[in-house]
Amino acid sequence: MIKQAGTIAVYVDDQQASLKFWTERAGFAEVANHPMGPDAFWIEVAPPGAQTRLVLYPKAIMPGWEEQKAAVVFECDDIQETYKTLSAKGVRFLEAPNQMPWGTYARFEDIDGNEFLLKQ
């Protein structure tokens, strides 16, 4: 049976700049970094201790990447504190935490304009 998501592709312009965003601003760890050709790498990042990882996939080698948007929700224990910490590190939030019947969420984007949700 499927237990969890393994990797989720996020299409990026500059893999190294994206890696820096996720490790330095969002607090993720680099899990894998393997050559995929002359100008591309298989780069995986994840929150420390997490099993699901983001693959920072280069747009340049993915035809039709514009049509393949990631829909990723990151769960956290304290959304207000997470929002505060990430905001202080320069993460741009499109929506501050909002409480809904199904939980509290906040929407943010990475340096390539990909949107993500935090949920508590």
Image: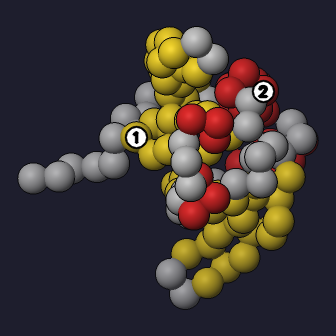
- As measured in the structure, the alpha-carbon distance from the residue carrying label 2 to the one carrying label 1 is 20 Å
Return the residue at label 1: 7
Question: Residue 93 vs residue 67: left or right?
Answer: right
Query: Taking the image as drawn, is residue 77 in sight?
Result: no
Tag 1 secondary structure: strand
Instruction: Give the amino acid at mark 1.
Output: Thr
List x then y, in percent, for residue 31.
Answer: 48, 20
Location of the C terminus (image quadrant) = bottom right
Asked where in the image residue 113 lies, by quadrant, the reply is bottom right
List x then y, in percent, for residue 81.
Answer: 74, 50
Q: Which mark is residue 17?
A: 2
Within 10 Å of the Cα at label 2, are there few (<14), some (14-19), or many (20+) other Cα atoms? Answer: few
Residue at 89 percent of width and 41 percent of height: 90
- Residue at the far left: name it: 1
Question: Residue 95 vs residue 105: left or right?
Answer: right
Within 10 Å of the Cα at label 1, are there few (<14), some (14-19), or many (20+) other Cα atoms? Answer: some
Question: Residue 112 vs residue 72: left or right?
Answer: right
